[in-house]
Image: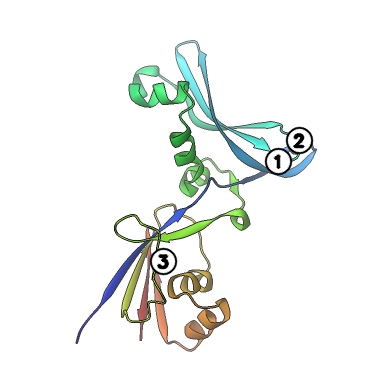
Amino acid sequence: MNYTEKEYWIKAEKSFEILHACSGCKRKQSFVNTGCFRVNANGNKLDVWLIYQCQKCRHTLNVPIFERISPSRIDKELYEKFLENNAELAEQYGRSFSFFKSKKFEVDQNSASIALYDENGKADESDACTDFERIVVHNDSGLKLKNEKLVAMVLKISRSAAKKLIDENKISLSTDSTAVTIEFI
Ligand SMILES: [Zn+2]
């Protein structure tokens, strides 16, 4: 049997938005990445935050990256990037679902913009890929995706068509911490 496999990588296309209580609006609001860091020396310890901002009133929210850390424990190159508000690094944190999860911040999943990339790191622009028996979708961001949404995105079909495939056991899905494997039965 000619066993064909395809691999994809899921990546966030922009920083996640965070849902958090805003002290300015006095209600839960959506906060966006400012692309800036704040570094604060406190005695011989450092705090480093990624700064988010309320979309409505611009109140800021500090998302801790390092708290009360000894400066010797921060990589020098990384530290320089914090000081210069390195945009690429701020985006890297902003697009990491597991980063926010580990800090117990609530990511606005509805605002998440994600895309499929191939093994060369290029955006997937192929046609529907039903020629494969097995498709592995790597999801390093840790973002939780509904099975229907994932299948629809990978196979480039509607959500209802994806649901039908799943419900009728035409495909099987197995999920581990970093990937989802879709197999055609
Ligand atoms: Zn606000």
Q: In the image, which is nearer the foreground, mark 2 or mark 3?
A: 3
Q: Amino acid at mark 3?
A: Glu
Between residue 4 and residue 120, name the one nearer to us. 120
Q: Residue at x 47, y 59 (%)?
A: 115
Dot 1 or dot 3, earlier in sequence: 1
Is residue 87 at all visible to an observer of this figure?
A: yes
**Disc 2 to disc 1, how far (Cα)?**
6 Å
The residue that mark 3 highlights is: 125
Quadrant observed for ligand 1 in the rendered image:
top right
Question: As shown in the figure, which amino acid type bears the numbered disc 2?
Answer: Cys
Q: Which residue is disc 2 drawn over?
A: 57
**Image color mode:** rainbow
Q: Is residue 169 above or below residue 90?
A: below
Residue occupied by mark 1: 55
Q: Is residue 42 above or below residue 116?
A: above
Question: Quarter-wise, where is residue 70 in the image?
Answer: top left
Which numbered disc covers residue 9? none
Rendered location of residue 98, percent (x, y): 46, 47
| Rendered view: 25 above or below 73 | below
Mark 2 closeness class: few <14, some 14–19, many ≥20 residues within 10 Å:
few
Q: Residue sitting at 47 percent across and 43 percent down?
A: 99
Identify the element where label 1 is drawn: loop
Please give left or right for residue 30 compared with residue 39 in the image.
right
* Residue at 45 percent of width and 29 percent of height: 86
Label 1 environment density (alpha carbons within 10 Å; few <14, some 14–19, many ≥20)? some
